[in-house]
Image (spheres, grey):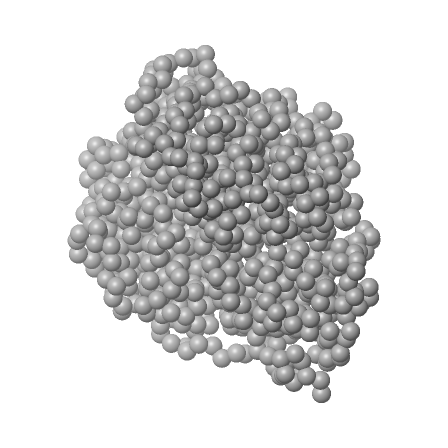
Amino acid sequence: MPRYLDFSIRRRARFFGKTGVCLLVLLVAGCGGGGGGSQPTGSVPATGQALASSTDSRSLSRRQSFSDDDIRHFLNRTHFSIEPGKVESVQALGLELYIDQMLEYPALGTQPYEIEAATLLADDDDPVDQVGKFPGRSDVVNWNTSLLMTNPNAFQEVMGMFWQDHFGVNVEELDNDEHHLMVHFVNLLRDRGVGNFRNLMVDVSRHGAMQVFLDGANNNKFAPNENYAREFWELFTLGVDNGYTENDIIESSRAFTGWRRQFSPVTGLTQIVFDPENKAVGSKVPMGIPIAHDLAEDDYATMVDLTFSLADENGNNRVANFLSRKLLVYFAQETPDQQLVNALAAELLANNMNLSPVLKKLFLSDAFYSNASREGLVRDFYEQVVGLVRTTGLTESTWVYRTYLSNMNSVPSQPPSVEGWPEGDDKINAQGSGIELPNFVNELLTNRRDQNEAGYDIGAVLQPESATGPVEVVDYVAELLGVTLDETEKAELVAFMNVQIDRDGEETPLTYTPQNQDHQNRKLRNLLWILCQHPSFQIK
Amino acid sequence: MTNNTQGLSRRNILKFALASAGISALGPVGNLAFAEADSRKFLVLINLDGGNDSLNTAVPLNKDAYYDRRPSIAVTNPLELSTGPAATSELALHPNLGSFQELHAEGSLALIQKVGYPNANRSHFTSKDIFHTGDASSINANDKSGWVARYAELYNNQTLGCVSIGYNAKALQSPMVNLMQVNSLSSMAYRSDGSYSGESQRRLEVARTILDRYQGSGNAAEVKKALQVGHENIDRIQAVINNYQANVEYPTNTRFSRSMESIAQLVHAGGLGTDIYYTGLGGFDTHSGQGGRHANLMSTLNAGIDAFSRDMKMLGKWDDCVIVVFSEFGRRNFENGSAGTDHGMGQTMMVTGGLVKGGDYGSALSDNDIRVEQNLPMEVDFRSVFGEVIDRHLAKDSTQVFTDSSQISGPQQGFL
């Protein structure tokens, strides 16, 4: 294990156990590491804007040095949360080297946490050669949630969720014999998250889960539906009304034909296969660009390359600008300046749409650490849940995770719409009155029996070894959770730590002692609860 | 007696906890005085998310074009609307909309045809933004206020003045208001740590104290606002739930019906001063295999409306209630090769309530409207429909709510 992945999962109690089954290694056929596949074949016009910027918030120039506060900002935006010891280990390695390692994924399905998570997909009744191929929807969610909580390289899962948000495929739209497609799809996004966007777009377009979700698998060559054609441009590559017309959508819907379901009575599984007989006959002319009829293959790659070659009236590549803005909104700034968008788009183009070097450039840039980027972004509820488990090591059952995530409509593998999860104000309002988070934290805090059986020691995880009193403990837990406290708030919390309240409300002065287990159960756990109600906990 | 950190006596702490904590484990909140048991008029907005196929909802009768252009998905056995004061031979209803048929027979279901807005946009998200903001230029509505929020700011600016339940509605969003939006009322209770219940009380008090003092900016300030809505109302909501006695049985198998029951719970409690309730159901983006999917959605809609309308009648609140059912757009006149329909334009909106004058509104669909055109025409602006409810039912001025001048011109329909 690389040095930076030093927060051992052995410290945490995990309760993902299901019936004992063979280990399952999930592999995405034809998918390599982060780079992924061949280069794009379409011609890609350069962006028309200069890279350089006179202000930090718009500049991709490399930041000279990185303080602990910078590292915390970086981790908050890219890792669900800050795990104990993480800031120190990143500093020890150096941020640039850490990012290099973070962007280098191991071969899919080979890691212990993946093998453990895969058991959640399996059932005792599965045929020996198809273990894990028939998961229920809940199993897929449990498996995906487990990956988010246990992957030592949290960024890989963050990036996988970025793409889930981007493509919006929801396992609820797939039938039982198609759930294996969702597992494959999630793995595709996890594996290729920092690879080549053009190649990812081609493979996602053809993927069985997407074909089912947006009705490509139900298409008809004589009167194709427009579902995928519209969202391909509107949500995945260009943005709403960005250079295409309703007639273009009709033409492109003809190009996105040729695939259909194929159920195998032998395996009991449905695959989505290319069938030339299902492809619309004749040439198609989306965006005024003719695509000659060719029965030998589909037009999907052609559609992607055609789209990736489009420039706006200023000569800027539309797809590069679209994706750059989305990356910036997700990781850096809610409303990025167009100059920064252009600069990142230029990096994407210079790297032939390979994301890894572009993300590295962003995460080391002045812009990423500027005041504009430090304006808080709202954390999704699933990020709060996953982050809490990763940071504290407190665990609950898969049922509890799924129940709370479902209550908040913030479920991995189940984006609430093809648009993904809500953003900005929508996200705040979707998270509503804030009842679910404290109740979820309460579940974590009160699951003492399972945690004790697993040898979990909350005092060791949530307190510095040197702590002698509540002041150090309050500071430490607040920093771990990314909660910013002023002096009045700290005083309030220290006072809370130094009083015992009995069942009938009777108060007794207490001298909080970090090593005292009763104090930990009574006060430290509830300190965590209070800090999770702080508005800054929902901000990253 | 030991004082706590706020200088309150223990007795005060308990009083505070009982009055505000709403922790079920601490015992019943008791019979809090509800808001005035008034005859407040209220509006329930039901958003059919995804673009409802209104041609298969309010089915045109005696139009060959409808069957010609929908050979596999046309509704062949619609429910006729041939009885009652609003009897019509122009329209019928999807066979799973039996309760709507009954409401029509009672003369309290208005079907408003050809509703839309200028320069229709067939993007779900742009069109939803337009419906939520009431502003037809809302390509990106994040910087625009929702129309329900504007109403609240003008006429009922308190956290329960307008609420959404089970549906995340941009219509309620604005920096100028702070309205309650919840996924479910039933979850509006804090769980406590049974081993340390006294600590659970205190942690809530401390969290609230810190929240009240918090001086964050940007998104953190917005989060604070949302959290405060919960803290402000959780005790009242808990009391509502504890005191609720159902008149009718709501189906429990759909989120929509549970949301309708939650709205009913608030109405039972005297309304808590709420003018507008917003909810919805999703799944209407029926590009393929529409028949069964749409039929199920119609059943879900029907079951929720059936229970709610009966409940309101038994409660004597039906005359105070107007329900508007709408979607971000209608769908194409013709089916595609996947036995579904793609995004369209015009739609038929449905309005019901005790004082609604049932009937068909807007000009009747012609055979050519369906046969020649790809989409239903748009002759009635959706804002004039909402506006009529604001003006004539809620007795407020809709021109202050809908200020976008680019509306389809025409008089209000007169269904109220």
Q: Is residue B406 visible?
A: yes
What residue is at 53 percent from the left and 20 percent from the top? Answer: A38
Q: Hey, which quadrant is residue B336 in on the image? A: top left
- Vertical comparison of A431 with B125: above or below: below
Is B14 positioned to the left or the right of A55 in the image? right
Front position in the image: A31 or A217: A31
Q: Quadrant of the C terminus of chain B?
A: bottom left
Camera-nearest residue between A246 and B331: A246
Residue drawn where x is 35% and y is 57% of the image: B145
Residue projecting furthest to the bottom: B1
Q: Nearer the viewer, residue A361 or A390?
A: A361
* Horizontal and vertical percent position of residue A96: 62, 38
**What residue sits 72% from the left and 70% below the top?**
A497
Q: Return the x and y of residue A105 as percentages of the image width and height.
A: 65, 32
The residue at the point 38 percent across, 25 percent down is A45
Quadrant hosting residue A323: top left
Residue B85 in view, yes or no = no
Query: Could you say which quadrant of the image residue B204 lies in?
Result: bottom right
In x, y percent, where is residue B105? 30, 56
Comparing B277 with A434, the one in front is: A434
Instruction: Look at the picture and state if B206 lies above or below A147.
Output: below
Locate residue B322, reporting x and y percent. 33, 62
Could you tell whether A215 is left or right of A369 in the image?
Answer: left
Q: How many marks?
A: 0
Position above or below: A11 against A104: below
| Residue B286 left/right relative to B87 | right
Quadrant of the image for the N terminus of chain B?
A: bottom right
